[in-house]
Image (cartoon, helix red, strand yellow):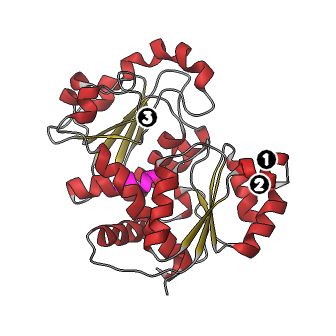
Amino acid sequence: MAGLQGRDFLSLADFDSNEVGHILSMASQLKAKKLSLRCDRVLGLLFTKASTRTRVSFTVAMYQLGGQVIDLNPNVTQVSRGEPVQDTARVLDRYLDILAVRTFAQQELETFARYAKIPVINALTDLEHPCQVLADLMTIQENFGNLAGLTLTYVGDGNNVANSLMLGCALTGMNVRIATPSGYEPNAAIIEQARNLAAGKSEVIFTHDPQAAAKDAHVLYTDVWASMGQEQEAENRMPVFQPYQINDELIDLADNEAIVLHCLPAHRGEEITDAAMEGSHSRIWDQAENRMHVQKALLASLLGTD
């Protein structure tokens, strides 16, 4: 889609429903080897936060497109010594064709995008994880054929994944139910944004009752109870979040054909049981694989192909 070339991808709300659909369609064709693309460019990965799936999937995706990847580890660059973001952004803009940033503050990501003319991708911030949700939507579509009218239930912490799921579901006509303990709801501004996007097409529902949220849902989704940077809070969160575990009892409340998703890494026995991860409803490993396919489609769309 020519309209995506040269754009940033800082939030799922940066794309409209047709553009999201284009990325998902291209990713599915790439996965099925029905489409071959060539994109001989250079991707920079600037990751302040630790990463397995995001780092490897972006790297493999770019290599498979025929491009190259530079891992800009902050610990061995001037970023770790306090070089201003705008200075780093303007220099990298002269060297790279596209940049994926994984950091804490959304504002830092937006500063990179403001000062760099090349496309900038949100590879995760504390506010959003849009590339993950593209893979989630692809996985759901693989299982159900269509997205519109389905219901996704997310249980746990109202974190960056929950924020992006609300936007992704709203854009694709899915109903989304978010079940969190009191005080752990998603970002208020994104809630309003998601409701505006969903208006007249689907529902965005919040509850503190995980059982009610799971009733007849087509997708059950969770994430860790303490995200990166919240490790010191983990012990105090455990008793608060225990009722929000995905287990056999919660799965039994969902639709008979429901699938279980987790963005990983998982703390087995906490937010999800071993049985739920390894059971017949789980599509977690397909979901992880699909990170590579959607990111390949995203890179090709933002850069254009040779």
Q: What stretch is highlighted in magenta?
A: 132-137
Query: Within the image, what quadrant is residue 177 found in?
Result: top left
The correct choice, above or below, for 124 with respect to 7 in the image is above
Mark 2 and mark 3: Cα distance apart in space: 31 Å
Residue at 64% in and 75% down: 97
Q: Whole-Å distance between the Cαs marked 3 and 1?
A: 29 Å
Task: Using the rendered image of the protein, determine whether residue 117 is visible from the camera's viewpoint.
Answer: no
Which amino acid does the dot numbered 3 rest on? Asp
Do the residues under discs 3 and 1 have CB atoms within 8 angstroms?
Answer: no
Position of residue 165 in the picture relative to residue 99 (left or right): left
Q: Residue 77 carries which label?
A: 2
Residues 270 and 1: in front is: 270
Whether tag 2 and tag 1 are in contact, CB under 8 A, the answer is yes
Helix, strand or loop at mark 3: loop
Please provide percent x and percent y for residue 115.
78, 66
Q: Which residue is tagged 3?
A: 223
- The nearer-to-camera label among 2 and 3 is 2
